[in-house]
Image (cartoon, rainbow, N blue to C red):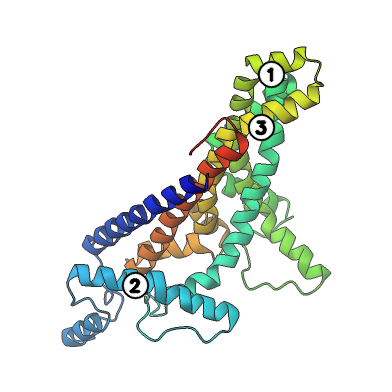
Amino acid sequence: MLSYTLRRLAFAIPTVLVISLIVFLMLDMAPGDPTGSLPLTIPLEVREQIRQSLGLGDPVMVRYFKWLYMMCFIEPMHILAGMTGWDIAPDGPRILSWQTRSPVGDILVQRVPQTLWVVGMGYLFGILIALPIGVISAYRQYSWFDQVGTFVSMIGFSVPTFFTGVVFILVFSVWLGWFPSMYDTTHNVTNWDSFLFQVRQIAMPVAVLALFNASQISRFMRASMLDNLNQDYVRTARAKGLGEKTVVLVHVLRNSMIPVVTVIAIGIPTVFTGAIITEQIFRVNGLGDALIRAIYVSDWPMVQTITFIFAILIVLFNLIADVLYGILDPRIRYD
């Protein structure tokens, strides 16, 4: 298992580098200019000086390696220095947002907590809801619980989050007045009342994301459980006199989790990059909101950074999913 993990890590590094090159070149060829948002009264020579100061006069490969160096070394060291207070941040240029002229790393650090708090909670609740629903639906196939679960799952999976988000705002905020329609990112929890307000304002975006995630994962869980419930080893376990709970919750559930782990692991990077549409609907000042705003104004350094982080997370969690295969299924031997 250790050698397999090391081999996957060795393959993951060139994979991430190729992805970074493709992302950089594609966005470099896209239309957009850092001086595009400046007033038209600024002379052309001043605009050219601004472009040169941002390094846009260098050849494309020089700019790529500079960006890669700043992305992999300069920005992480600055973020680590900001988190720990250690004086380890190196001197040198940083990746600057064309829109705000601020370091991209600082902007992402400010927005990550909002995204993890809202999107992460939505994903966590989605998993906690989906797994028992999938198990019970499969075990009691065609029962009323299975029928209701299938109906709700199909609605949650088929209806996009931008529609359910608007419906939630209309019903629970406009008609009933239970929850605020917009998320206040400046709100601080200092006492019981402020905590209750935090719960109220986070309830709707978390519910929308949890419904979508639970619908998807529960369908995979149900299908995987049905495949395993009809296997020979299940009949053998029952013939040996094992209790039904032991057969289902130990033997069947463990084998059924193998494909579900892949779905859950691949979905985790979306937690870190934010739910773009949901954050826009509820005005959550997270990474998804930063990404969509950067695309609107052609802020390519911000888009490149978020996209590259997303690619790293995808590769990393694919590796984690493969390693978990071996833990859940002892028949798998990578060595």
Q: Which of labels 3 and 1 is toward the front?
A: 3
Q: Whole-percent x and y of residue 251?
A: 70, 27
* Residue 90 in sight here: yes
Three-letter residue code for mark 1:
Gln
Tag 1, which secondary structure? loop
Instruction: Please state if 25 lies on the left or on the right of 324 as rendered.
Output: left
SS for tag 2? helix
Is 79 drawn above or below residue 256 in the view shown?
A: below
Relative horizontal placement of residue 283, taking residue 42 as reference (left or right): right
The residue where tag 2 is placed is 69
Identify which residue is drawn at 36% across, 56% down.
16
What residue does disc 1 label? 141
* Label 3: few (<14), some (14–19) or many (≥20) C-alpha neighbours in 10 Å: some
Say which of 145 and 81 sits in front. Answer: 81
Under circle 3, the secondary element is helix
Q: Earlier in the sequence, mark 3 or mark 2?
A: 2
Q: Residue 241's quadrant in the figure?
A: top right
